[in-house]
Every structure is written in C-alpha cells, then in structure tokens.
Amino acid sequence: MTTIAVIDYDMGNLHSACKGLQTAGATTVITDRVSDIERADGVVLPGVGAFDPAMEHLRSRHLIEPIRRIARSGKPFLGICVGLQVLFEGSEEGKEPGLGIFPGMVRRFKPEPGLTIPHMGWNQLQLAQPDCPLWHDIPAGAWVYFVHSFYAHPADPAINAATITHGSQTVAAAVRQGNLMAVQFHPEKSSTAGLQILSNFVSYVRQTEAVAV
C-alpha cells in the first residue's frame, strides 16, 4: 500500500488534500513526526496562510532540517500553496528565511489598474514542463483554483512546471525539479483537474516505489 505523509504544522486544513490522495488509492498519515515522514513512500507539505508563521511552526517542530534532507533524498515530494513558497529562500511577505531548497524568492504581485490582489479564483495553467508527472491527462489551459497575494520567482526559470497570467504578469503556478514538485494553486479545490493532479502524484509515488524495489 502506498503511504503518503502529510506534514502537520498547523497551517491549514489538511483533510481535503488527504481525501484527494485517498481517492487515488493512497494511505495518508497526518503527522509532524520525522520518523513517519521518513518511512512514508511520498511526502506532501500543504499550507494556508502567511510565510513567516509557516516557517516558525516548522522550526518549533524541529522539521526544517528533516524536510531539507528528505526533499533532497529522492523521495517524491509535493508542496501545496504556502508549502510551495517555503521551499524558496525567502519572501517579501516577511523576514524569516525559507527552506532554501529552491534558489529564488517569493514576490508580491505588483499593483496595476484593474488587478485584483489577492489573486483569488480560477485561472488557466500554461504548462511549461509537459513531461512533469503532475500533468498526465491534464490539458493545456486546465482551470485550477488560486488564493494568493505572493508568487514564487525561481532563480532558474527552467524549474517552472506551469505558469499563469494575472493582469499583465506571468508568474509561476507550479515548479518541479526531479522528485520535488510544488503547486501554488489548491488541487483539493480544483474539481476534476485537481483530483487528477493528486492522483498523478500518487501514481508517481508508486512508480518510484517500483523502481526502488
């Protein structure tokens, strides 16, 4: 049975993401125990809220170094929303350093006439890495659901797996480098496309298990 650890650090409702993973056939474990995360076949780092509290909660649970180690170990890893942002070096939203797994910063949307901030609602994905495991059976232009005022700005744009356009600004909607994947949108709120993306992550975890065996 494929087991996915969903990291619990008091930053959002974890159960919606778990439900999508379970629908795809995974067993989920909501946990802040390093031993559980290390034993799992895959890891999900969700998050809702602000950057600094997210990092403070991770630090208080002594999870910063374990997450860095596990993310770099080759284990399938998926960040969601703030769980994407904390993978970077820092954010204009606060002062805390991020995990620094991806070089780059999290930036604030620049105000412009007619632009709504936060970016809230449905937007269309522009797939920058069509071979990303998350995009199996996801068409170009798929609609997914966002709630954010800040976006990741990778130092290396080649890690952008998908982008969206908001006003005149085109920004990262998802990033991927090897086993590390993260999305700014909420797949658990993104209807059929979101459930397919979570199912694709579970399939990727299973494939990785099979290769390891």
Image (cartoon, rainbow, N blue to C red):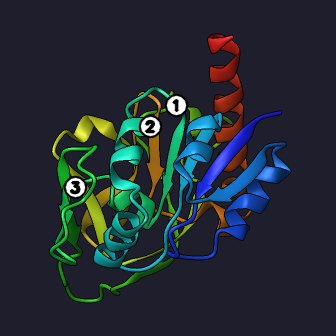
- Snapshot quadrant of residue 151: bottom left
> Please, is residue 106 above or below residue 40 in the view?
below
- Residue bearing the label numbered 3: 153
Q: Residues within 10 Å of mark 1 (few under 14, many from 20)?
A: many
The residue depicted at 35 percent of the width and 43 percent of the height is 68
Q: Under tag 1, what secondary structure?
A: loop
The residue depicted at 83 percent of the width and 33 percent of the height is 1
- Residue bearing the label numbered 2: 70
Whichever of callouts 3 and 2 sits on the residue coming sooner in the sequence is: 2
Q: Amino acid at mark 1?
A: Lys
> Residue 104 or 170: which is nearer the viewer?
104
> Residue 83 or 108: which is nearer the viewer?
83
Label pair 3/1, CB-CB below 8 angstroms: no
Tell whether 171 sits left or right of 156. right
The residue depicted at 33 percent of the width and 86 percent of the height is 117
> Residue 152 or 164: which is nearer the viewer?
152
Q: Position of residue 4 (x, y in %)?
A: 68, 44
> Residue 166 or 178: which is nearer the viewer?
178
Label pair 2/1, CB-CB below 8 angstroms: yes
Whichever of callouts 3 and 1 sits on the residue coming sooner in the sequence is: 1
Q: Residues within 10 Å of mark 2 (few under 14, many from 20)?
A: some
Q: Amino acid at mark 3?
A: His
Q: Position of residue 191 (x, y in %)?
A: 73, 64
Whichever of callouts 2 and 1 sits on the residue coming sooner in the sequence is: 2
Report, in whole angstroms, how far the alpha carbon at label 3 lies from the one at label 1: 24 Å
- Residue bearing the label numbered 1: 75
Can residue 32 be seen here? The reply is yes
Can residue 141 be seen here? The reply is no
